[in-house]
């Protein structure tokens, strides 16, 4: 067989795959469009766009919407738009005291959101992987019942991660190390009907703060800017940095470990084994311990949902409880101090407070802003806008779902249609 006879079809398939991605991504970014408008916007000819849209419809990625009326000339055309609630990506977050699962459709609408309280450190690595597997399988079963097809899964972990291998290098606040979490979950879900015709969906793994930053930039409070820092406030503290619209990963992918910056002059011991880490001043455990009135306080009860415990903090602050108010001031100032280091280095447009920082933002933000104004070298705190995430503890799992869906936008042929290849 000649080289020409094999190369030409391959090139045609590559071009078509690229054009399918172009049209699908344009509909995501620009919203519903007529076929003629898509052709004009993308530079493709109308016949090609009609063919591409037909294939995307058949693959369940696009649907026909309302008739175009305003400003149209001649016969009105049907608008085409992303199909909602059929093709979904799944984000799974594991943290020290909970597991969170979020499924998003192509429009980034929430199809499923579940949280399970658990002491992951007490469960250990084997028990923790078992719980993660159960939570993921339960979510996949629910998505099958809802008529959804899962095209990707991303796990968010508070850890140094080797994303290429889907492996946790070290997760200090979980007590896990050298854990092949991606391959383990891939194997545990192989053959699940949620994947449709696919035998399996490889499970990707990334740092939780990185995925939180992706969520805020894609669909959250930072979607109007291309330069932001996301601070994840949980048992550990991490940050995700977006510059010029791209996540900053660093030379070996381990960027963002701001929680272990040596900013605590008291030299308290951290879960990582070192002393003086920033998260020993601003981590969730520090906040709850500082506000608690004794060892039996509900704030220290791991069986009580974290949202419920933070509601108690807000109630005590409103009642001007002296211990609570003093703790919030101390944590807020320390939070602003660490944030000022990031703002001085990165100069972001927006600083997003995530996790418990977001849920207590009305009580912490003032201290953060005042400290930024005092500590940032550039005038007016570098012009940074401090915003609270609206996702709370679900930002990382939502970012994981966004990343899972990116695979489809990059290559729509990953989703098989009724007759498509």
Image (cartoon, rainbow, N blue to C red):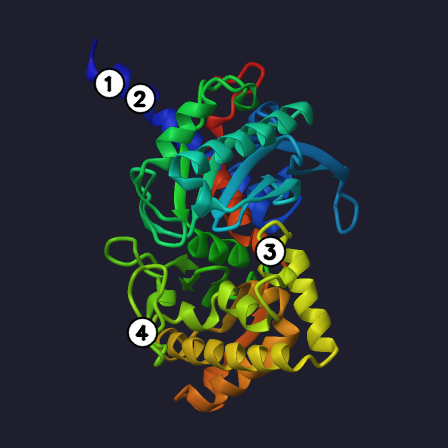
Q: Which mark is residue 301?
A: 3
Q: Secondary structure at mark 2?
A: helix
Report the Cα–Cα distance between label 4 and label 2: 58 Å
Asked whether disc 4 touches disc 2, contact meaning CB atoms under 8 Å apart, the reply is no
Question: Does the residue at mark 2 contact the one at mark 1 (Cβ under 8 Å)?
Answer: yes
**Are circles 1 and 4 on residues that touch, CB within 8 Å?**
no
**Between 375 and 35, which is closer to the camera in this rendering?**
375
CA neighbours of label 1 inside 10 A, class few (<14), some (14 to 19), many (20+): few
Work out whether mark 4 precedes mark 3 in sequence or the reverse, and give the earlier one. 4
User: Which of the two labelled residues, at mark 1 and mark 3, occupies the earlier sequence position?
Assistant: 1
Q: Which residue is mark 2?
A: 8
Taking the spot 48% from the left edge, 84% from the top edge, the residue there is 372
User: Which is more foreground, mark 1 or mark 4?
Assistant: 4
Give me the C-alpha separation between circle 3 and circle 2: 65 Å
- Above or below: residue 16 compared with residue 218: above
Which residue sits at x=64%, y=42%? 113
Give the label, 4 or 2, closer to the camera. 4
């Amino acid at each position: 067989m000649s080289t020409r006879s094999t190369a030409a079809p391959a090139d045609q398939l590559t071009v078509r795959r690229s054009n399918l991605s172009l049209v699908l991504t344009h509909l995501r970014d620009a919203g519903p469009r007529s076929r003629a408008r898509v052709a004009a916007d993308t530079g493709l000819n109308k016949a090609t766009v009609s063919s591409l849209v037909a294939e995307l419809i058949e693959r369940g990625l696009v649907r026909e919407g309302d008739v175009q009326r305003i400003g149209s000339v001649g016969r009105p055309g049907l608008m085409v738009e992303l199909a909602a609630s059929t093709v979904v990506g799944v984000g799974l977050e594991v943290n020290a005291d909970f597991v969170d699962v979020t499924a998003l459709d192509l429009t980034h609408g929430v199809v499923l959101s579940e949280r399970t309280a658990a002491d992951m450190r007490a469960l250990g690595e084997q028990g923790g992987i078992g719980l993660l597997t159960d939570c993921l399988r339960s979510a996949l079963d629910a998505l099958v019942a809802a008529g959804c097809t899962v095209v990707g899964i991303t796990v968010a972990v508070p850890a140094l991660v080797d994303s290429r291998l889907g492996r946790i290098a070290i997760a200090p606040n979980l007590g896990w190390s050298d854990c092949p979490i991606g391959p383990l979950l891939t194997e545990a879900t192989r053959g699940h009907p949620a994947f449709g015709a696919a035998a399996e969906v490889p499970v990707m793994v990334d740092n939780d703060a990185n995925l939180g930053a992706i969520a805020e930039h894609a669909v959250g409070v930072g979607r109007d800017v291309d330069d932001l820092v996301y601070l994840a406030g949980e048992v550990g503290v991490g940050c995700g940095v977006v510059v010029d619209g791209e996540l900053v990963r660093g030379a070996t992918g381990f960027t963002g470990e701001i929680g272990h910056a040596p900013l605590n002059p008291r030299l308290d011991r951290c879960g990582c084994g070192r002393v003086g880490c920033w998260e020993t001043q601003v981590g969730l455990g520090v906040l709850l311990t500082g506000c608690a009135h004794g060892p039996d306080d509900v704030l220290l009860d791991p069986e009580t949902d974290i949202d419920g415990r933070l509601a108690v903090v807000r109630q005590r602050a409103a009642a001007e409880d002296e211990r609570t108010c003093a703790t919030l001031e101390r944590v807020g100032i320390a939070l602003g101090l660490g944030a000022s280091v990031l703002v001085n280095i990165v100069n972001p447009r927006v600083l997003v407070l995530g996790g418990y920082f977001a849920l207590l933002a009305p009580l912490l933000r003032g201290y953060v802003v005042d400290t930024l104004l005092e500590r940032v070298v550039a005038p007016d705190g570098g012009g940074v806008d401090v915003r609270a995430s609206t996702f709370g503890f679900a930002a990382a799992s939502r970012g994981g779902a966004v990343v899972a869906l990116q695979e489809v936008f990059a290559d729509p042929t990953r989703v098989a249609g009724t007759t498509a290849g």
